[in-house]
Image: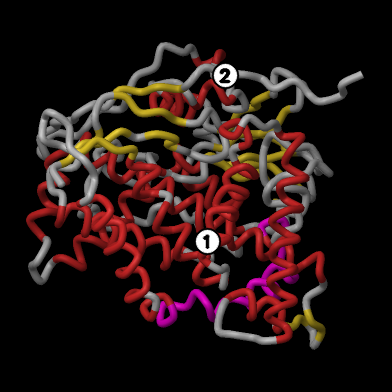
Amino acid sequence: MDQTPARTVHPPVLHQVQVQDWPRDREVPPPETTLDLDDINLADPATWGRPDIHGVLWRRREERPIARDEHRSTGDAFWSFTRWDHIAAISADHATFSNAYGVTAANDRGAVNAAEGTIISMDPPLHTLMRKVVNKGFTPRQVRALAPAVNRRVDGIVERLRQQPTGPDGKAHIDYVADVAVRLPAAVICDMMGIPEEDQDLMVDLTGKSLTPGEYGLTRHDIPRVVAEIDNYGLALGQERLADPTDDLTSLLVTGQIADQPLAADQVGPFFRLLMLGGNETTRNALSHGMLALTEWPEERERWIEALGTEAEDEVAWSAAEEIVRWASPVIHMKRDATRDVVMGDDETGRVEISEGEKVVIWYPSANRDPRHFPDPYRFDILRDPNHQGGFGTGGAHFCLGANLARREIAITLSEVLRHFPDMAADGQYRKVRSNFLHVVAELPVSYTP
């Protein structure tokens, strides 16, 4: 008898580009939703495919900021937090809220997921010791040193865009995700890891399968096999680097030590996988959301274009990158497990008693639009200041290792795209992946004059 799990087939999640035109002297109102408060379930991936998702999050954050959500298929429940202050407090308190039992809301203890065995699924002090092994590959100085390599990769993307055929309207029509957003971060992290050019498409394919299996006709039951393929590739490359070290991140992994001991194979493989996942998928999603936001907020697009070639260019580009990450929130949630009984909340939000062993889930897209932390949060503003966005995490031990690299890739890529193709814009409908873990734009049709 065939024991292959049946795949759940979901219809495409299609959305329409919505051009915004809100005057600066008027705050953008919060979006609305047709869902009643009691019908909101953030555990359901279908909720995240709704066009009114930010209205859903507004209602939950303002009316029930601490709530219970439940997986309808399993009955598995967890506590949901949607306000910035709560999420920042949970992120900072690793002694009470542990990463050690997995970081996705959909998984029970022991279930295999893309983060299995990585430093994301570790608490300090082990997490801190492991992180130090590759920290020097992501220092601000090291990331600045990568700028020429990033520029060369972006120049190659621009040249390919120039060569695209045009239609009767005189414009080229492409999928921005496949032709721009995927290409840069994948190439950069592969270069940093020391992966040969001929293997880079394979690694991009495997990382995509591990995070969004449904996009490849797979199910979550295929994830262990895909994870093993990534880990085994990393181990094989690591063996080559042990014999002949270079200046890449894989060499840092296999030559690094913790307590005067080299990393074991079951540490090297998952660490290699984490660097591939983080360096590829999240920046790709931020780049896709960035082009979409610049289409829907044309005034912000013009502000960026006007800054190109001036003394303000770098400042505007870096500020815009920060706002794009806030707007996109490429990682939708992280899960923690309570290590002790704890009370959360106050008189205004209501207090809840969380028992040891219960799951706690923090929702970054909601935190990044919390009006208590961001004035006029529903406005995309490339010069937002201050902008302590939580798209890389809201602080604590697990703040994104590659945040500086991601900022640089976003700033350089979109600056060059706007410089060479100032009329590039999203065109019509775009497709998102149905997920409550990653905020993935799967297809983004754009048009432009080559």
Tell me, yes or no, whether the two marked residues, 1 and 2, touch with CB atoms within 8 Å.
no
Q: What is the chief secondary structure element of the magenta stretch?
A: helix
Image quadrant holding the N terminus, namely top right
Q: Quadrant of residue 56?
A: top left
Left or right side of 392 for 2: right
Q: Residue at x 39, y 58 (%)?
A: 184
As helix, strand or loop, the secondary structure at mark 2 comes to loop
N-terminal label among 1 and 2: 2
Question: Viewed as shown, does residue 72 lie left or right of 153?
Answer: right
> How far apart are the two marked residues, 1 and 2, measured between alpha carbons?
31 Å
Residue at 73% x, 19% y is 73
Q: Which residues are magenta?
A: 120-142
Residue 271's spot in the image, x, y percent? 68, 65
Give 282 or 128, whichever is nearer the viewer: 282
Point 70% across, 18% down: residue: 72
Establish if 54 lies above or below 376. above
Residue 283, horizontal then vertical, whole percent: 44, 53
Residue 315: x and y in percent read 20, 66
Q: Is residue 294 above or below residue 202?
A: above
Does the rendering let one see residue 141?
yes
**Mark 2 nearby-residue class (10 Å; few <14, some 14–19, many ≥20):** few
The residue wearing badge 2 is 10
- Quick one: label 1, few (<14), some, or many (20+) residues within 10 Å? some
Q: Nearer the viewer, mark 1 or mark 2?
A: 2
User: Residue tagged by mark 1?
Assistant: 400
Disc 1 residue type (three-letter) = Cys
Q: Can the viewer see residue 425 in this picture? A: no
